[in-house]
Amino acid sequence: MDSKESGAYGAGMDIHPALRGAAWARSLPVGGPPVDSETLAALVAELADRPDLWAHLVRHDPRVRWYERVALSDTVEVWLIGWCHGQHTPMHDHGGASGAVAVVGGVLQETTLWPSRPPASRLLPSGTLLEVPPAVIHRVGNGFPVPATSIHAYSPPELEMKTFEQALRAPALLAAAA
Ligand SMILES: [Fe+2]
């Protein structure tokens, strides 16, 4: 990502060069309060429908999970992530941010951690649109040989997430960590 974009995109909007000029970029929220998971889901869904804007950027590196931020404003950030077999996040929250995920290739697996229930896992095949409310603690990864790709949005942006790997092994720790 290079210099701050301004003008038609508004002050404080940083857009990957590949996405500049797209109506999607001009519609990104900027200069306002944080937006909710439903709004973010609409935002990632709209970008998911425009692979001509981002498909050429995606990488899948078997050595390390690949990611690139493609948009940042004071209200929202948007990332592309490429997942090879076995790559996953730690169990994490989002620092109080709302989020949304569009799976645009392959199959991801999400494991969600709840304070008073066993961890729950589900598959997120390509085409899945996922709202991630601020209270969600989860781990996302690719357990399949086919590379997976996803688009993520968070609001507010750049909040520090907390990890909960110990709580995954002993859910009772979650209450203590909250
Ligand atoms: Fe997450």
Image: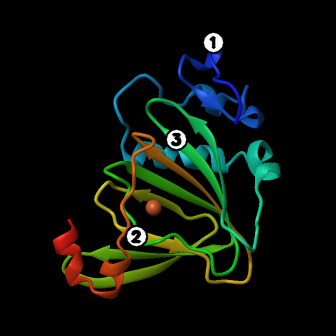
Q: Residue at x 17, y 73 (%)?
A: 175
Q: Is residue 23 above or below residue 85?
A: above
Q: Position of residue 10 (x, y in %)?
A: 56, 17
Q: Is residue 19 visible?
A: yes
The answer to which of marks 3 and 1 sits earlier in the sequence is 1
Q: Position of residue 30 (x, y in %)?
A: 47, 26
Query: Could you classify mark 2 by the number of other residues whose Cα lies within 10 Å: few (under 14), some (14-19), or many (20 or more)?
Result: many
Inter-mark Cα distance, 3 to 1:
19 Å
**Residue kind at label 1, given as amino acid type:** Gly
The one of 11 and 128 positioned closer to us in this rendering: 11
Q: Residue at x 74, y 78 (%)?
A: 146
Secondary-structure class at tag 1: helix
Q: Which of the labelled discs sits on residue 77, or is there none?
A: 3
Inter-mark Cα distance, 2 to 1:
38 Å
Task: Determine the image quadrant of residue 168.
Answer: bottom left
Ligand 1 neighbours mark 3 (CB distance < 8 Å): no
**Which residue, given by chain and number where applicable, does mark 1 sit on?**
7
Q: Is residue 126 left or right of residue 129?
A: right
Ligand 1 neighbours mark 2 (CB distance < 8 Å): yes
